[in-house]
Image (cartoon, rainbow, N blue to C red):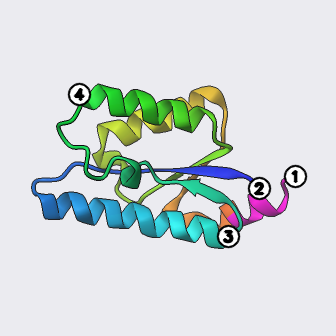
Amino acid sequence: MRVGYVAGPYRGSSAWAVEQNIREAETLALEVWRRGAACICPHTNTRFFQGALPDQVWLEGDLEMLRRCDFLVLTSRWRESLGAKTEHDEARKIGIPVFHEDSLDELSEWLGGCDE
């Protein structure tokens, strides 16, 4: 089974805005699962960790998880996030496919053509 990684905004102007960003990423992760791949959603991995460690720790950990994945999926607002931009750039650098929330049929086609 292929493993994907969701990237998109996490931070927000309020706790509610952060929660909405997390929910958007969770919804996308569930859709990836429905299409036949496992999916890492870093938003949920550190949901309640705000302030426990410097933000750079989370980003470094997220990049390491991404490096172990087969593909990246971006939320619709990924360009609003410095972290998601960094994850996008890392995926391009290491040569894993990048898919967008609004073109998940391309992901399905790619998954269908992958040899396990």
Q: Which residues are magenta?
A: 108-116
Q: CA distance from mark 1 to mark 2?
A: 7 Å
Tell which circle, 3 or 2, labels the residue nearer the N-terminal end: 2
Q: Residues within 10 Å of mark 1 (few under 14, many from 20)?
A: few
Q: Amino acid at mark 3?
A: Arg
| In this rendering, position of residue 59 left or right of residue 36 | left
**Pointers 1 and 4 in contact (C-beta within 8 Å):** no
Name the residue that disc number 2 marks: 1
Name the residue that disc number 4 marks: 54
Callout in the foreground (4, 3): 4
Q: Residues within 10 Å of mark 4 (few under 14, many from 20)?
A: few
Tell which circle, 1 or 2, labels the residue nearer the N-terminal end: 2
Helix, strand or loop under label 1? loop
| In this rendering, position of residue 106 left or right of residue 18 | right
| Front residue of 71 and 77 | 71
- Residue appearing at x 23%, y 27% in the figure: 54
Name the residue that disc number 3 marks: 35
Helix, strand or loop under label 2? loop
Callout in the foreground (1, 4): 4
**Pointers 4 and 3 in contact (C-beta within 8 Å):** no
Tell which circle, 1 or 3, labels the residue nearer the N-terminal end: 3
Name the residue that disc number 1 marks: 116
Helix, strand or loop under label 4? loop
Where residue 68 sits, quadrant-wise, is top right
**Pointers 1 and 3 in contact (C-beta within 8 Å):** no
Q: Amino acid at mark 2?
A: Met
Q: Residues within 10 Å of mark 2 (few under 14, many from 20)?
A: few
Q: Is residue 114 magenta?
A: yes
Where residue 93 appears, x then y in whole percent? 58, 26
Tell which circle, 4 or 2, labels the residue nearer the N-terminal end: 2
**Pointers 4 and 2 in contact (C-beta within 8 Å):** no
Callout in the foreground (3, 2): 2
